[in-house]
Image (cartoon, rainbow, N blue to C red):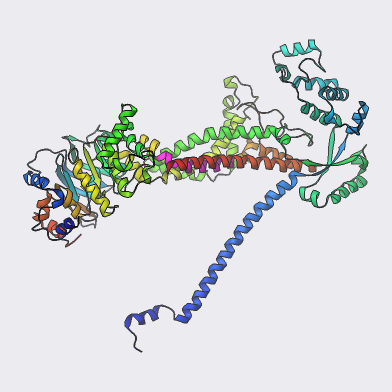
Amino acid sequence: MTTTAPEKQTRDYFPTEDEYQKLLGRRTRFGHTVRLTLLLMLTIAVVGLGILLYTIIDDSFGLVAVINENEPEDILAAYGYDPATTTLNDLNKEQLVEVLAGSVSSGVGRRLERDQRFFEDRLVFETQEKWDEVCASDDPPAGCDGGVRSKGNVVDLVQERVIRPDIVAASGLTGSILNPDRFKEKVQQDFVDNPDNYEPFTYEDVRYTWRAWFSWKFITSPASDRPEIAGVRTAVLGSIWLVIITVLFAVPVGVGAAIYLEEFARPNRINDLIQTNINNLAGVPSIIYGMLGLAVLVRILEPITSGSLFGEGAPNGRTILSAGLTLGLLTLPVVIISSQEAIRAVPNSLRQAGMGLGATKWQTVRSQVLPVAIPGILTGTILAVARAIGETAPLILVGAAGFITVSPSGPFSQFTALPIQIFQWTSLPQEEWRHLAAAASLVLLVLLLTLNAAAVLLRNRYSRRLT
Amino acid sequence: MNDTTETLSVDTADMPPDPTLTAAPTAMKNARETPEEAGPGVIETKNMDVFYGDFKAVADVSMNFAFNEISALIGPSGCGKSTVLRSLNRMNDLIPTARTDGEVLYHGANIYAPGVDPVEIRRRIGMVFQKPNPFPKSIFDNIAWGAKINGFKGSKADMKDLVEGALRQAALWDEVKDKLNESGLSLSGGQQQRLCIARAVATQPDVILMDEPCSALDPIATLRIEELMLELKENYSIIIVTHNMQQAARVSDRTAFFNVELDTKGQRTGYLVEFSPTDQLFTSPKEKATEDYITGRFG
């Protein structure tokens, strides 16, 4: 058999048929191995996230061992009700207030009444004279505005002030479902080992109930030094205020800077330097921003950040405004960079089309470039802001309060934020706080998911409008 | 269409009159004076050089574009014909390193003189690009936007009239009149390019520059654009860059041939070889380079 020239060349450069088949098998197997490795990596990532979520949820619900200072049955019996047929919820508001008034000191009662009245037509703890005097003062308490406590609110007060439950031990969700007895044995054992811790109560006084640490009540209650009633209202409101200020500062400034850099800046030395610096700033650790915030916003700009310049009264610059601006600065480089990417991705033909019609640069950017870039800008901005919500370090430096029960009322309020609250709770020794921290983490996650979902919806709406 | 292509493609020496272009323009063509005799046209370049940074892209271009004619710029790749076109309405200003020396006179006034706002120039001298580039907006807004940003003062009804007029001029009205609120991107390539022409027409320029407007289109769409150009010629002066010599022969009244030369440093600089009435350039070119190019010996 004679071979022609090109065939010969093929034999020189390429493997023989047998070799080729072997090689093909090897190549295919290698491809499979790579695919499996990649799948394994994905699995590790998913399992890691799963474990994280599981831990948080596991700690957010479960059995608790409670010792009531006063058993509801005893209270009911003391006031002449039959504990066998009535519960606290069956009593009407008058009866509940009577129970409450019988147990709390008159000082505490007066404070509760000044926070919010029990009845519209009469006072329970205050005298009318004193009430009128207090309400006529320069700084009248909240109760003077009218509002009356609901029955549910009074039930809560009775729980909190009369029954005074004390959680002595808590269990995770899986343990509570799969092996509640083990938890109970452990609690019992602890009573045997350390009876002094529980004086004057004994194991007989322990009640087991289910508790959802993550609940609407948890979200709406202010912080407290008692884990039974502590909530995250102050922290959630603080975080929301921070997000608002961060967005108000970082988005206009960041998008503006990005537009300038992409559309108007000529490529010269100064602009290159600025661009390089922005890229580097995006990688600066957040605690550095915290130091900047402390030095500049809290200290130097104190008249502005404390609000004293505007006649508002925060004692120092450790306010929501300082923290929001610090987070804004932290977010700014990422917002600029992602906005630049989005603007750069707009096809040049649109700019030429706009300019070719006799539009000015700004008209072209405003009407043709930005609408196309907005979905991308939104995506980047949202990721940046989501990062800011979870930041803890700069807030600690800028002076977030670890414990604060008053809800923030404006940019010049002192504040705490969810990550700070979580950090503070996890550093406390008792087990209950760990469950509260888990529940607060869940709140933070829900807050993040809500923001992201809103952003995705917004982005999709813009994208749809364009095609 | 086919006839035209064949007759014009190779041997242009004894070209019969193009049947599709009707006899009238041909007669007019013959009556035209040479550019030198015609007096100042709508746009006149005098010794124009265009640089990108240190690189000289085209050198010493002097041309006179007459009113209400179609002028075609042809030549091999890299000869600077698009650069010349973009210099005529200062679109080259958008490239930061670009610089134009010499004069470009529009109605006798130098558009590169200090104090001239390029925005105004671009409104008077509109542009249609190689790739159809409608805005990602409705068909209506695509056309209305140019008028709005240029200070359109009329009522909503006036705007509707303007949009309809522009679409009619671009021979697109019948195809889109029922879907003016749909996106400009939903149209076919040829329709998109006609939309871009309508968009350019709506700002009421008097010159329209077209940079290879048909290179992304199929032959049928190309034919429609060419017919459209011949109609628009009544009201506008049109300057078109094309790679397609048949297209230049079919539609243009005057054709400029650009060539490119390598200098000692290996840089390619484009220059104008000749600018003559189209039938003359294709039948009896003055320069050897032109003849070589149009007969397909190079380029």
Q: Give the x, y percent position of residue B150.
A: 30, 31
Quarter where residue A120 is shown = top right
Q: Give the x, y percent position of residue A280.
A: 50, 45
Q: Is residue A353 visible?
A: yes
- Front in this rendered view, residue B227 or A290: B227
- Image quadrant containing the C terminus of chain A: top left
Quarter where residue A147 is shown = top right
Residue located at (44% from left, 79% from top): A15
Quarter where residue B120 is shown = top left
- Image quadrant containing the N terminus of chain A: bottom left
Q: Main secondary structure of the magenta part?
A: helix
Residue located at (29% from left, 35% from top): B164
- Front in this rendered view, residue B12 or B95: B12
Q: Is residue B263 magenta?
A: no
Q: Does A335 sit above or below residue B248?
A: above
- Front in this rendered view, residue A412 or A16: A16
| Magenta-highlighted residues | A369-388
Q: Give the x, y percent position of residue A414.
A: 66, 29
Residue located at (12% from left, 45% from top): B25
Q: Give the x, y percent position of residue A448.
A: 61, 41
Would residue A173 be found to the left or right of residue B139 on screen? Answer: right
Would residue A370 be found to the left or right of residue A124 on screen? Answer: left
